[in-house]
Image: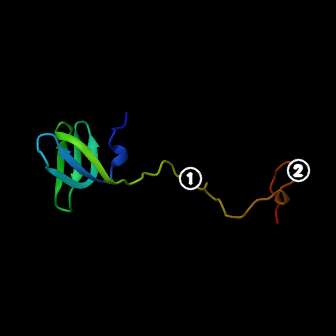
Amino acid sequence: MAHWLEKHIGSDVEVHYINQTGYRDRGYITDAGDGWVELQKDEDDILLIPNTAIRIIKVIKRVTQPTSKLLKPAGYNNDLITGDDQDVEGNLLKK
């Protein structure tokens, strides 16, 4: 089963802690797994935060993950195939 935070990887978030009143960290979720969230605050500052310390994660800007990609088959060209390009059996006619 996928981790519940995976859909927010790459999102700009603000983490509020259970025991630290008013204290929070802001950054980008770079990874999430069993019991931990990895938060990158800037280039040099990466935090590993245990889930048990998190009161709430506020999503500031969500990064949408593509659900699927539509790929062209190998050898595909952009020519439009019409009924005029096929014989009665559906075979392509040579031009």
**Relative vertical location of residue 68 with respect to residue 95 in this rendering, above or below:** above
Identity of the residue drawn at 36% across and 53% down: 62
Label 2 CA crowd tier, 10 Å (few <14, some 14–19, many 20+): few
Position of the N terminus, as image quadrant, is: top left
Position of the C terminus, as image quadrant, is: bottom right
Q: Which mark is residue 70?
A: 1
Determine whether label 2 and label 1 are within 8 Å by CB. Answer: no
Element assignment for label 1: loop
Residue at the spot of label 2? 88
Identity of the residue drawn at 34% across and 48% down: 8
**Front residue of 27 and 83:** 27
Q: Residue furthest front?
A: 22
Identity of the residue drawn at 82% across and 50% down: 90
The picture places residue 83, in percent across and down from the top left corner, at 83, 56
Quarter of image, res 37: top left
Quarter of image, res 32: top left
Q: How far apart are marks 2 and 1 (CA)?
A: 30 Å
What's the residue type where badge 1 is placed? Answer: Leu
What's the residue type where badge 2 is placed? Answer: Val
**Front residue of 11 and 61:** 61
